[in-house]
Amino acid sequence: MFEDAGYTILDGKTGSNNGFDGLYIKGTVDDPIEIVIGEAKQWGSSGGVSVNAANTSTQLPQQMSDNWIKNVAARIRDSAKKITDPVLRNERDKLADMLTKQSNRSKISKYVTVVNKDDGVVNILKLGSF
């Protein structure tokens, strides 16, 4: 959907399946016009959806919070240190820079895509800042 709207998909994953479920930009990593961070969730049996709460044992901030985005960016930067190809390492560093740059904060939009497995209905929720 975002690609159809003119966004470029980026790799926002860290490790096996951590990080962002979706990361899209308009513009370039060096000069983004808009940054979209997306998470996918399933509709809960209680009729709602929630993002992961802050976890004191892992030190992870609440999912989709501004601090969580900074945490994921730090993990992207840390994982870049293990990349031997200097071009790929530089791309990951630039991605982390884009996500943490103060002037880009207002360009970040957060979305949660919620799927109800029972009836196939998909809802897309835009989150505010927190």
Image (cartoon, rainbow, N blue to C red):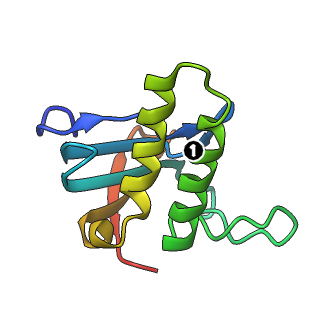
Q: Residue furthest top?
A: 85
* Residue type, label 1: Ile
Q: Residue at x 41, y 34 (%)?
A: 91
State whether residue 15 appears in this view.
yes
Residue drawn at (26%, 73%) of the image = 106
Point out the residue furthest to the front here: 86
Residue 18: x, y in percent? 63, 42
**What residue is at 63 percent from the left and 56 percent from the top?**
45
Q: In this picture, is 85 found above or below 13? A: above
Q: Is residue 53 left or right of residue 35?
A: right
Q: Label 1, on which residue?
A: 76
Would you place residue 60 above or below residue 29 in this image? below
On screen, residue 92 above or below 36:
above
Instruction: Report x, y in % for residue 69.
Output: 51, 62
Q: Is residue 117 left or right of residue 127?
A: right
Q: Is residue 58 left or right of residue 36?
A: right
| Image quarter in which the N terminus is found | top left
